[in-house]
Amino acid sequence: MNNNPKISKQDMKRKKAFKSYLKIKRDVFFGVLFLVAVLGIIIPLRPTVSTIEKRTLTTFPEFTWQSFIDGTYFNGISTWYADTFPFREALLTANSAVKGLYGLQSEQLVGNSDKTGDEIPDTPVLPSSDETTEATTEATTEAATEETTEEQLPDGAIHDIPEASGNVYVTGDTAFGLYYFSTDGANAYVNMIDKAQKKLDGVANVYDILVPTSVGIMLDENAQEAIGSSNQGKAIDYIYSSINSVNKNITTVNAYDTLKNHNSEYIYFRTDHHWTALGAYYTYVQFCNAKGVEPTPLDEYETIEFPGFVGTFYSSSNQAPSLLENPDTVTAYYPKTTNDMYYIGSDLSTIQWNIIMDVTGWDRASLYSCFAAGDEIYAQIDNPNVNNGQSCVVIKESYGNAFIPFLADHYEHIYIVDYRYFYKYPDYNNSVYQLVTENDVDDVIFINNADAMTNPNAAELMSDMFN
Amino acid sequence: MVFSSLFFIYFFLALNLLIYSRMRDIKSKNIVMLVFSLIFYSWGGPQYLLLLVSMTFVSYIMALCIHTYREHEKLFLVIECVIMLGLLGVFKYAGFMLGSFKALTGIPEIIPEIALPIGISFYTFQLLSYVVDVYRKEVLPQKKFWLLLLYASLFHQCIAGPIVRYKDVEHDISNRIVLQKEVDRGIKRFCIGLAKKAILANGCAVVADTFLITSDAAALAKIPAMGIWLGVFCFALQIYLDFSAYSDMAIGMGLMVGFHYKENFNYPYLANSVTDFWRRWHISLSTFFRDYVYIPLGGSRCSKSRLVFNLFVVWFLTGMWHGASWNYILWGLYFFVFLVLEKNFLLEKFKTLPGIVSHLYALVVIYFGWILFKFEDFNCLGTALKGMFGLNGNGFSGLQVGLTFRNNIFFLIFAVLAVTPIFAIIRRGVIKWYKQRNAVPYLVYGYEIVAPVAMLILSTMALVGNSYNPFLYFQF
């Protein structure tokens, strides 16, 4: 056996190396396993909210005998453990980076729902108003990429209700939320605004502004068709012509053409489903033309910028890395005559705020909240420096926020009604008519994005304010 | 609790290994494993723990009776089979059978909804195999009830297989030694399984589910043909990666504590016939049916028509085991047809043709088999089959299909490689290269130290915030 000492020495070396290798491998594996296991039980390390997914994370389940016996208690523990895992956001981001290696991802279609769009009729096809305002449709009660802010803190808004996502198309550094036309949704909207105007007849002027979303303006029409997104130009045409045929007293404002005209400019965000203040400005110009007032030239506004905005499309595209790496910049234009407003908090207290709030340092996903206090149950702008006796009610969702600041120089009072939350404000009993008559309001302006008219629930909420 | 969950890995398993390693004698080690296994089982609902324990107790008694009263052995065996299979039948198949009966005759009006106890298909078969093996005098009955309960409930394989025979682990239960080499193999095996499930299987599932819509035939009809083909392809990858991952993790965890479970998969997509496929896929199930159904019926040592009958029974049961729904039975019988054809002349024919032909034949048969497996609803099944050939007016391809494919192309290539033994082959080649030079294979050692931990970390990242994580064979 020891005839050749050289080989034996090699043998010994190999055996020793093998033994060390075994030990190191074991130590490394169990070291990592137990380290993470220990981290896993350090409760303070566990997050309670997810900024990426915009929701509060699962809480530790309540113990009940029933839930113990049928296993839901234990299931809840496992879910809580996974959902609030330490360093969750970092791990999620890292995982998205790894998934970015899965293939060629310059273009992606992220399907969060299997919606499809209805054919857009060429001429108005309206059933009677009774049917449509109660219409609940088959597949179109999903989507609504609405942002909801229940609470605003200095460090950024936390959203209680998770954002529902439609399908998202990502190409390069830009995301688009697909648009699906719904005949029921469109008809419900038409009937709603007809009802509203009839209620306000002789009391206030009704303006209707339908704002297309980025997919209908920035994406080539062939591409829209290829990804199955309905044509927003046609859809808005259909709705406006339907409105004009039932009610001659509603002034419809065409935002589609002007936005299409300016679509080489930065009028929509790439990482968020909202438009920019610039896009809102061009629409404001159209509104002024419809109303018959002079719009303020753009260069007369002072501006402020909030860079590093990574909005809603980041999470609804499963954290497409290209969006994170190419954030947006929010540019806001200060009204010339006032920057003061107030809003009503969820506890019904009055909170003084700014029309353009400085959101520097806020969470990167919340920067759009700089406009008009975001989405509250009620808000109001009283302008001491305008004395033309004009006031308006703006009925809106989050798209309206970027539009409202441009109105501030034209009205003494702007009453801001977010149709999703107005019912929570007791002062007006969810009645816009009451708001209008009590305050002698001149104009009622509806401003909604295209998605709002695919969902009959939106029309129903608005309709409830005119009972 | 599922293996591929953060809670299982970083709380349950970590705690289990920690406490286990502190135990000095086999008795305390077994107690630790039993306690953890019962907790693991109860995690899905303590109400079914009672069932597991009772069924194990019945088997415990029956085995002892068979052994002690050999003159009545048949009686006890029958009692055992009736109780085990009866309970399995009630919990798993009552709803299905009543539903089918109702479809034919209109009665009964109301079909009771019976929840399926976790793992019942696995542990019932394990207990049956134990009692039959005692009957056949292949193994002595376990005198200590708690050790039999350990066998039946051991969390490594109770819920998701492999179906472990008592005689294969009898020695391990009472005499375990932990060898360092085995611990290392166990670590690697476990991590490979975890990564297969958390990363590969789940990734394939996302693509498969995008195109194979099981709940809505109308939506399914709109999927372009290429979408269905791609979807089934990804589903084929998914189901292998998913199921073999669980066996990998079970085997890995077993090795870490000294249990030796048999392999349950052997690169099934390398098969060159359906016969060969079933020697490579869910081996513990096919050997169970072979040893406890096929051979008792006479196996292949009988007339040709009897052989066909035997095969029919086995494949009907195999299909049915996979799910209480007609599509699974159809899936089993689909293979039955090909197996009969192969036994009769196809295999002979293939011997005269190049190997690639039989391999392609096998892949095509298996591929279409997965469509039967995927759709429980016959409406959707028909729509999917029609959709593959554009008969739904659904077009050849579409933007989403092309994009999904491009978005995942590297991943899919990797997944395909993962179902082949190529990584193992490369590794063996590298080791051989080092051996020839009589050198220490530092490269291999380095890889072997880093790879498991890398897979563990990558899997952890994948599991965080992962809403999609069901185990396909979980309806068992």
Image (spheres, coloured by chain):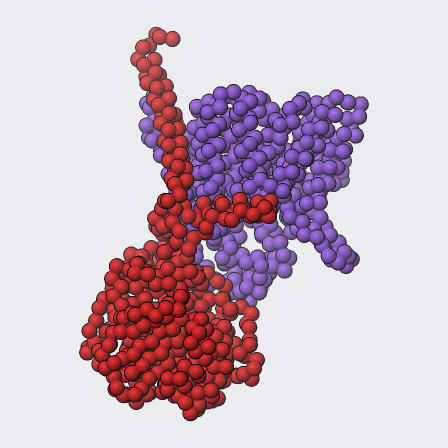
Chain colours: A red, B purple
Instruction: Report x, y in % for residue B31.
Output: 55, 27
Viewer-closest of A60 and B132: A60
As drawn, A327 above or below A59 = below
The residue located at (34%, 13%) in the rendering is A8
- Residue A68: image location, x then y, percent: 57, 45
Residue shown at 43% from the left, 57% from the top: B404
- Can residue A121 be seen by looking at this rendering? no
Is A88 placed above or below A243 here? above
Measured along the vertical axis of the image, is residue A28 above or below residue A291? above
Find residue B329 and report its horizontal and vertical position in percent: 67, 48
Quarter where residue B66 is shown: top right
Is residue B92 depicted above or below A50 in this figure? above
Please name the residue shown 44% across and 32% down the image: B187
In this view of the protein, can residue A53 be seen by the observer? yes
> What's the residue at 37%, 81% (across, down)?
A393
Quarter in which the C terminus of chain B is drawn: top right
What is the count of numbered marks? 0
Pick whichever, A222 or A70, lies toward us: A70
Q: Position of residue A273 (x, y in %)?
A: 37, 67
Q: Quadrant of residue B338?
A: top right
Q: Tell which of A211 and B293 is nearer to you.
A: A211
